[in-house]
Image (cartoon, rainbow, N blue to C red):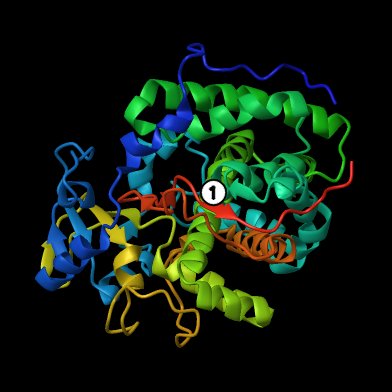
């Protein structure tokens, strides 16, 4: 397939967006003790979460608060009339674009979200499992099955959800490497010039693809969105391009993190992995527990749309609020022994996909991808265990969480071809 333009890489070819994780999200092995300390101080704590974790704040001179009480977290996420998503304008708005549904508030947000949400309904997403997800999984695994050892992050989970998106978008294979560099670079807010450059170049690329798919559309996701009409007109370019820019991070980066954390938790608890291997009906519970226990995104940002009182604290209009889903997910009043990973614990809804009008559009796809990945691991990696001769997986990051490596051993498998 050819496009109207070739995708353009960063001007500085030495820039590596994959090294940006530590700069943006820290190296903290376990932020939860600090989160428990904050909860003991009150439901609403003055100062940003970055400041609480010892990092500089980027909210300027605006008042800021960290929300750790579960009741207050629920209130902020659900009540969009008092708590705005406009706080993302200062970062995501510059890179994904001001047409991103993540920076919008109602009624505009609801109008566009409903359109995108239909595409990611469970009945549609499930069909992608066999046609798109499974071939990607098996293609990646075939490269390391004969060795009997692997780094599941480097060789599997880091590539897996991104490869799924490439298939959904029907991208030319020659563009994939540069596309992923730009997509990851969009959220490198410690290097804002490169983040903005990435957004601009992805925007130019998507505009060319949209024009091409409208002229010769197929069954890929870009064609589907490019041909979608609202009130007799195509989706506005600003909204459509912003959504496509965001897709790599919303559906790729967080799924890579969630899948990596799931595998880490199970391999650290081999008795629970064995229970699932014997009864795969436990897979949904394992996924939800992994998302609760150490979700890939610990906090969301909101801005007070008016003067409010929350948790007994007066919050002025315009204040930035770091809403800690990670605090609600480990609230001992809701989850007994919350720091323990336990796939058999009583089922309760977690906060890792947020709540309210901005609940994650791609949550169903994330669950399908995590489910398919776990099935593939159990189907193909017999006698799977952590490699005792290499470092154990260590989940890191105070805001976005992921292990850098998961070194494993398993029985070698011959692969045809």
Residue neighbourhood size for the residue with mark 1, other residues' Cα within 10 Å, grouped as few (<14), some (14–19), many (≥20): some
**The N terminus sits in image quarter:** top right
Q: Nearer the viewer, residue 116 or 411?
A: 411
Residue at position x 16%, y 72% in the image: 311
Q: Is residue 186 left or right of residue 112?
A: left
Residue 316 placement (x, y as % from top left): 15, 55
Residue at position x 16%, y 52% in the image: 52
Relative to 267, residue 179 above or below:
above
**Residue 312 visible at all:** no
Residue tagged 1: 250
Q: Nearer the viewer, residue 332 or 47?
A: 332
**Residue 1 visible at all:** yes
Q: Nearer the viewer, residue 284 or 200?
A: 284
Farthest residue in the bottom direction? 346
**The C terminus sits in image quarter:** top right
Picture quarter containing residue 121? bottom right
Residue 18 placement (x, y as % from top left): 47, 32
Q: Is residue 279 left or right of residue 259?
A: right
Residue at position x 55%, y 78% in the image: 285
Relative to 245, residue 8 above or below:
above
Q: Nearer the viewer, residue 256 or 69?
A: 256
Picture quarter containing residue 133? bottom right
Q: How many marks?
A: 1
Q: Secondary structure at mark 1?
A: helix
Residue 58 placement (x, y as % from top left): 23, 37
């Amino acid at each position: 397939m050819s496009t109207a333009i070739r995708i353009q890489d960063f001007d500085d070819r030495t820039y590596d967006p994959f090294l940006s994780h530590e700069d943006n999200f820290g190296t903290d092995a376990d932020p939860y003790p600090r989160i428990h300390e904050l909860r003991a101080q009150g439901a609403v704590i003055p100062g940003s979460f970055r400041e609480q974790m010892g990092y500089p704040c980027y909210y300027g001179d605006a008042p800021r608060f960290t929300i750790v009480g579960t009741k207050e977290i629920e209130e902020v996420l659900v009540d969009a009339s008092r708590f705005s998503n406009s706080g993302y304008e200062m970062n995501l708005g510059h890179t994904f674009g001001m047409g991103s549904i993540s920076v919008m508030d109602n009624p505009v947000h609801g109008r566009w979200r409903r359109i995108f949400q239909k595409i990611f309904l469970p009945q549609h997403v499930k069909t992608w499992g066999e046609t798109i997800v499974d071939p990607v999984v098996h293609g990646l695994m075939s490269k390391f099955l004969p060795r009997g050892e692997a780094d599941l992050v480097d060789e599997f989970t880091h590539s897996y959800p991104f490869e799924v998106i490439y298939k959904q978008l029907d991208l030319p294979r020659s563009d994939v490497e540069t596309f992923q560099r730009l997509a990851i670079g969009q959220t490198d807010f410690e290097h804002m010039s490169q983040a903005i450059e990435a957004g601009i170049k992805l925007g130019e690329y998507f505009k060319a693809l949209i024009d091409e798919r409208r002229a010769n559309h197929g069954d890929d996701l870009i064609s589907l969105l490019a041909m979608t009409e609202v009130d007799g007109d195509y989706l506005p370019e600003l909204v459509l391009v912003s959504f496509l820019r965001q897709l790599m991070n919303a559906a790729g980066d967080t799924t890579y993190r969630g899948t990596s954390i799931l595998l880490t938790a199970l391999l650290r608890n081999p008795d629970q992995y064995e229970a699932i291997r014997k009864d795969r009906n436990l897979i949904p519970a394992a996924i939800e527990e992994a998302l609760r226990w150490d979700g890939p995104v610990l906090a969301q940002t909101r801005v007070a749309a008016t003067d409010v009182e929350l948790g007994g604290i007066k919050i002025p209009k315009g204040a930035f609020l770091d809403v800690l889903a990670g605090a609600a997910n480990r609230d001992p009043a809701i989850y007994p022994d919350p720091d323990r990973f336990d796939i058999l614990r009583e089922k309760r809804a977690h906060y890792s996909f947020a709540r309210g009008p901005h609940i994650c559009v791609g949550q169903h796809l994330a669950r399908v991808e995590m489910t398919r990945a776990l099935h593939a691991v159990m189907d193909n990696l017999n006698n799977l265990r952590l490699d005792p001769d290499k470092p154990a997986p260590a989940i890191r990051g105070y805001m976005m969480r992921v292990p850098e490596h998961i070194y494993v051993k398993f029985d070698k498998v011959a692969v045809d071809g």
